[in-house]
Image: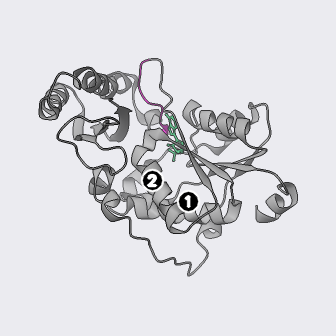
Amino acid sequence: MQRRLENESAGKRIGFVPTMGALHAGHLSLVKRADDECDLVVLSIFVNPTQFNNAEDLKNYPRNIERDLELIAQIKSDVIVFNPGEREIYPENYAVEPIDLGKLDDLLEGKFRPGHFTGVVEVVRRLFEIVKPNRAYFGLKDFQQVAIIRLMTKFYELPVEIVPCEIVREESGLAMSSRNERLSDAQRNDALIIYQALRKAKEMIHSHEIAEITETIEEMFRKSSLELEYFDIVNPETLESLSNAEKGAHACIAAHCGEVRLIDNMQLI
Ligand code: AMP
């Protein structure tokens, strides 16, 4: 990968899209944006074991490299696909001191997926080291991840611009996710409650207290087949819970739909 990029990228602006594969229109929107803004696009497909805090989740994560390559081949421009093995990313005895993510690691996802963001930082840092992108594209679907990657690039003073990209949804409103592949048709339908809850919060934000909104959303989930893990309205930068509405207030949700854990978020004001 490094040799190829050395040969091909001289004087070119490299746009990078890191993924774990099982590609869908959300991933492709990142590739399209990178293609519009850069001279060369690299997409990586690597299911990073160190960011899974649950062995079953890692085992069940959808993988379909042939279909991924077909999807990428349909894009008009050339995209360099990097599909490394685990040893390429983590050579034997590879060890990097984890950085302190501060509060960002204790809130929202961090609370429920211990070690997840340490793994994310580790793999993205390593991928950046190999690809050396000028710009890297991340979906706001993983809202907290964008904040953590920003913190990481600042910490290491990496010369890469982090570009956050809008969430791509199904027509129904369900946020696209590789994990949706594991939902039955009925579950896909039930999972719409996540989007409905976010819309409800947005509708209520100007006329209700945050505590009332939270109670309404929790009640919606109690009546549904999904199990709510958290619903939180947070400051978009610190990700700390808000008790009063303010500009930029952002609602974040995680919920279990059967065996599948889904996340979503929406700016409310
Ligand atoms: P993943 O393969 O799930 O690790 O995702 C790779 C990248 O695609 C991450 O930056 C995600 O935030 C982004 N992504 C995943 N789903 C969506 C979506 N529905 N809309 C926009 N970006 C997404």
Comes first in the chain, label 1 or label 2? 2
Q: In this rendered view, identify the residue nearer to me: 153 or 265.
A: 153
- Residue 257 spot, x, y in % from top left: 30, 35
Image-based side of 230 in relation to 40, left or right: left
Dominant secondary structure (helix, strand or loop) of the stretch shown in magenta: loop
Q: Which residue is mark 1?
A: 124
Q: Which residues are magenta?
A: 172-178
Residue 49 in view (yes/no): no
72 vs 84: above or below: above
Helix or strand or loop: what does disc 1 sit on? helix
Which numbered disc covers residue 146? Answer: none
The colour scheme of the drawn protein is: one colour
Image-based side of 60 in relation to 192, left or right: right
Q: Specify the amino acid type for callout 2.
A: Lys
Image-based side of 85 in relation to 11, left or right: left
Q: Mark 1, residues whose alpha carbon is within 10 Å: few (<14), some, or many (≥20)?
A: some
Q: Which residue is mark 2?
A: 59
- Within the image, what quadrant is residue 114 found in? bottom left
Give me the residue at 31% from left, 29% from top.
Answer: 194
